[in-house]
Amino acid sequence: MAGSLAGKVALVTGAARGIGRAIAVKLASEGCAVAVNYYNSADEAEALCEEIRASGPHACAIAGSVGIPDSVDELFAEFGRHFDRLDILVSNAASGVLKPAIEMTLKHWRWCLETNALALNLLTQRALPFFGDDARIIAMSSLGAQRAMPDYGFIGASKAALEALARALAQELGPRGVRVNVVSAGVVDTDALRHFPNREQLLANFAQRTPAGPVLTPQDVAGAVYLLCLPEAAMINGHTLVVDGGFAISG
C-alpha cells in the first residue's frame, strides 16, 4: 500500500475506541501496519483490525493492561509473534478516577500514575529491542497536565508526570535515533468524556473559547500524531504538541 508510512509498524495502546482508534486508522491509511492494543474492548478491536486489513495494511489485536509489568510483557510477546520490528509506539491508553483530590486514596493515586505515566516507561523498555534507528514514541496527554480542572486532580498529576517522563526519555534515547514526544489534546467528545459529570459545560466552554472552531475531533488529534511520525519531524524531540484549536491561549 502506498503512503508516507508504508512499510512501517505501529503499536497503539487503547486503540479500540476514541482517539486511539482514530490514530490507528490514520497511521494505517498512510500504509502503516498496526498492532491494536485493547484492555476490555475485544469486539471493537477486532472490528478495527478487519477495517484496516480491508484497506491493505496488516493489523492485529493484542490484549493487555499497560500499567502492569507482567501484562506488558505478555503484550510484547504476542506482538513479537506478528512483527519483528516496531517503528512507532503510541502510548494512548489511559484511566483514572474523577473525584476531588481531597477525597482520593493511595489506591487511586497508584491507579492513575501506573496507567497513565508508568505505562510509558514499561512500554518503552519492552519496545527497545524492536526499535530500529529511526523510531518514534508518542505519548498522549491532556490540558489537565497544565491546568486545574474540577475532579481531575490525580489524572492531571499523572499526565504532568507523563510529560516529564517523556522529556527524560527523549534525552536518554535521542542518541539512539528514537524521538519521544507528547500530544496534548483539548476537549474531545469521546466515550471517555461521557464519564465527566460536567461534560456539557466542558464542551460548551471549549466551543466558546476556541479560536479555530467549536469542535475538536479525534481525527484532528490523530493528524498531529501522524505529523510527528514523518521524516520531516526528525528534529522534534522532547516536545509537547498542544492540539486544542487555541483554547489554552484564550484566557
Image (cartoon, grey):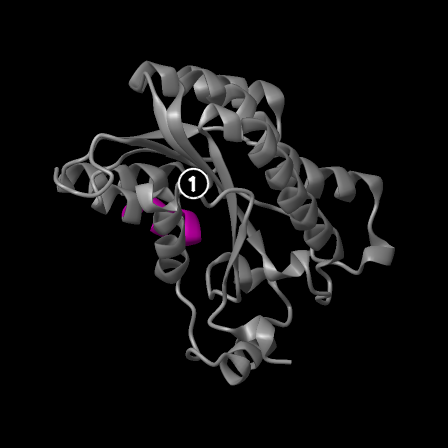
Q: Which residue occupies 39% across, 40% down?
A: 234
The location of residue 191, given as percent across then percent down, is 48, 58
Which residue is identified by label 1?
41
- Please tell me how many numbered marks the rendered image carries: 1
Position of residue 183 relative to residue 122, above or below, is below
Position of residue 74 relative to residue 97, above or below, is above
Q: Magenta includes 118?
A: no
Along the viewing direction, whichever of 16 and 161 lies nearer the viewer = 161
**Which residue range is magenta in the image?**
18-25
Along the viewing direction, whichever of 127 and 136 lies nearer the viewer = 136
| Lateral position of residue 212 relative to residue 120, left or right | left
| Lateral position of residue 172 relative to residue 74, left or right | right
Q: Quadrant of the N terminus?
A: top left
Q: Which residue occupies 58% across, 57% down?
A: 142
For the stretch drawn in magenta, what is the main secondary structure? helix
The amino acid sitting under disc 1 is Ser
Q: Which residue occupies 39% across, 65% down?
A: 217
Q: Magenta includes 21?
A: yes
| Lateral position of residue 218 relative to residue 101, left or right | left
The location of residue 128, given as percent across then percent down, is 48, 20
Residue 152: name its quadrant. Answer: bottom right
Q: Quadrant of the C terminus?
A: bottom right
Give the secondary structure at mark 1. loop
Q: Is residue 97 visible?
A: no
Q: Is residue 91 visible?
A: yes
The location of residue 225, given as percent across then percent down, is 40, 49
